[in-house]
Image (cartoon, grey):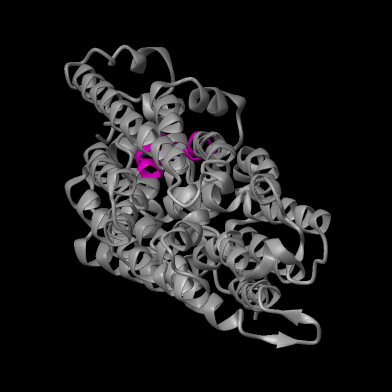
């Protein structure tokens, strides 16, 4: 039986709950959820959501970056991608990818995130499959644009999805547990590409099979996920009725004042939420920071095979050499996410990652041997990949309620992904094999990441002190508490 029919027969817990009164809100702050029940809810969510989210993000990153593997398997030669044509192919992906971020986040709840995200995946899986059948530069351009259309709403939508189910300081570890699929996809993608590029059949030789096989697997996975992902805690069929209600209640109480808003299914859209998301310091700084973070992440993901080929390794060997640094990046995401959630800090973790990646790019620029330069790719991977989920969790932690977070998160992803237009042109063919210009651009971005993170941390500390001292209590007399969201005096920003 599909999840659709189940939800029609059994209305969600959110719909059954009354809109909270001021007395209910105050009482919810004073009632502790049974720790055993809380842990049981979290464990069930981890078991039923994270494997699917991990797989979705794994295939998303493979299908957007496998073009780098296809490049060194004959793509540029077969389609005559001379000059900067390959860089153009990379950059067009981000046109629609960026434009759909905010509107996509705003319609997630209307369609139902449990259906919407798998639908996106199925769409880009089909496009990836057809990319292997293209015979021209123009056809490849069209496929990359359509790939960006379907993947565009994914990242922000997945962050928003996780924030519907988990309290604020459980979010980053969960983001890390599925985001680590990005560097892992680089590692496994290299292995897959090494094998698939050996296929020669029916006139399609080498690189087309990277797209055809990986796209087909993505399509099947997305179609299957459609039937298993719930929309909200109150529609999760793997919960008992007691667990459903408790899962909804703990999301009410998590935001300390901002919890005065209704449950996700009870909220209605208001342009006031959009304004709150767009015009605040945390959104501006986290958007800028995400832009800077994605410059090294995208350039690294797209051009690591090219960089390694520039060190003198060719073909299958170059593909295989992309595996170890990406696997270290996978471990780094998990470790940093666990540490960040445990100590409830975001900014210091980002700064540490930036400093670590700086070492890697300095080794790339100053290194005199292939061994030193290759070792530098490990430092880069360990530093850059963990920063992306951390900065997104940072903004999600500091925005509330749902539509504010949806708008702010969508804007962050949209602005951040503009970095792709920088990243896709950082490593040009004429700069090889040392690519000093590309390494220097990434090093400069990392320096700015440290500066922006320090400014954001300083603002958060200052604002939290203002609230602790009662300097924001006047907001309670001017507006209904339910309309304050993250502006509520009891709401504390995460550093």
Using the image, determine if residue 322 lies above or below residue 351.
below
| Front in this rendered view, residue 271 or 322 | 322
- Left or right: residue 399 compared with residue 366: right
Q: Is residue 309 magenta?
A: no
- Left or right: residue 119 compared with residue 54: right
- Left or right: residue 166 compared with residue 7: left
Q: How many marks?
A: 0
- Which x, y percent locates residue 43? 31, 69
Using the image, determine if residue 205 lies above or below residue 116.
below
Q: Is residue 403 magenta?
A: yes
- Which x, y percent locates residue 64? 59, 59
Q: What range of the chain is rendered magenta?
A: 391-406
Residue 346 visible, this angle: yes
Q: Quadrant of residue 219?
A: bottom right
Using the image, determine if residue 199 lies above or below residue 189.
below
Residue 261 visible, this angle: no
Q: Main secondary structure of the magenta part?
A: helix
Q: Quadrant of residue 173?
A: bottom left
- Left or right: residue 202 compared with residue 168: right
Using the image, determine if residue 455 lies above or below residue 228.
above
- Which x, y percent locates residue 213? 65, 79
| Front in this rendered view, residue 240 or 453 | 453
Quarter of the figure that contains the N terminus: bottom right
- Which x, y percent locates residue 350? 28, 41
Q: Quadrant of residue 270?
A: top right
Residue at x 29% of width, y 46% of height: 357
Quarter of the figure that contains the C terminus: top left
């Amino acid at each position: 039986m599909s999840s659709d029919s189940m939800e029609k027969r059994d209305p969600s817990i959110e719909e059954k709950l009354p809109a909270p009164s001021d007395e209910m809100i105050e009482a919810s702050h004073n009632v502790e959820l049974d720790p055993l029940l809380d842990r049981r809810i979290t464990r069930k969510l981890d078991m039923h959501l994270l494997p699917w989210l991990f797989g979705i993000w794994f295939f998303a990153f493979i299908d957007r970056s496998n073009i780098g593997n296809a490049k060194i398997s004959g793509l540029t030669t077969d389609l005559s991608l001379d000059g900067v044509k390959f860089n153009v192919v990379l950059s067009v992906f981000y046109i629609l990818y960026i434009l759909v971020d905010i509107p996509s986040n705003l319609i997630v709840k209307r369609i139902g995130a449990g259906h919407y995200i798998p639908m996106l995946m199925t769409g880009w899986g089909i496009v990836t499959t057809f990319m292997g059948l293209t015979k021209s530069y123009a056809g490849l351009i069209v496929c990359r644009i359509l790939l960006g259309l379907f993947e565009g709403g994914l990242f922000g939508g997945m962050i928003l999805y996780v924030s519907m189910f988990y309290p604020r300081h459980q979010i980053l570890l969960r983001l890390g547990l599925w985001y680590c699929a990005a560097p892992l996809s680089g590692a496994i993608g290299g292995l897959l590409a090494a094998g698939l590029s050996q296929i020669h059949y029916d006139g399609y030789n080498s690189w087309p099979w990277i797209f055809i096989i990986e796209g087909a697997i993505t399509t099947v996975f997305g179609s299957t996920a459609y039937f298993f992902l719930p929309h909200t805690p109150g529609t999760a069929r793997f919960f008992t009725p007691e667990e459903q209600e408790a899962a909804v209640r703990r999301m009410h109480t998590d935001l300390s004042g901002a919890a005065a808003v209704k449950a996700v299914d009870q909220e209605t859209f208001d342009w006031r939420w959009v304004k709150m998301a767009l015009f605040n310091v945390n959104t501006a700084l986290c958007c800028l920071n995400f832009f800077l973070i994605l410059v090294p992440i995208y350039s690294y993901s797209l051009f690591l095979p090219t960089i390694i080929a520039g060190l003198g390794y060719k073909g299958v060997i170059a593909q295989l050499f992309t595996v170890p640094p990406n696997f270290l990046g996978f471990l780094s995401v998990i470790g940093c996410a666990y540490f960040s959630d445990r100590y409830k800090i975001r900014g210091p973790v980002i700064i540490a990652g930036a400093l670590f990646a700086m070492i890697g790019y300095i080794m790339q620029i100053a290194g005199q041997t292939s061994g030193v330069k290759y070792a530098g790719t490990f430092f880069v991977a360990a530093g850059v990949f963990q920063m992306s989920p951390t900065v997104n969790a940072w903004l999600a932690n500091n925005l509330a309620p749902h539509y504010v977070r949806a708008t702010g998160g969508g804007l962050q992803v949209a602005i951040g992904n503009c970095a792709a237009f920088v990243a896709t042109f950082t490593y040009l063919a004429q700069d090889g094999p040392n690519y000093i210009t590309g390494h220097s651009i990434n090093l400069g971005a990392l320096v700015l990441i440290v500066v922006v993170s320090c400014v954001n941390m300083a603002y958060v500390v200052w604002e939290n002190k203002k609230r602790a001292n009662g300097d924001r209590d006047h907001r309670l007399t001017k507006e209904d508490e339910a309309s304050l969201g993250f502006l509520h005096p009891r709401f504390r920003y995460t550093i």
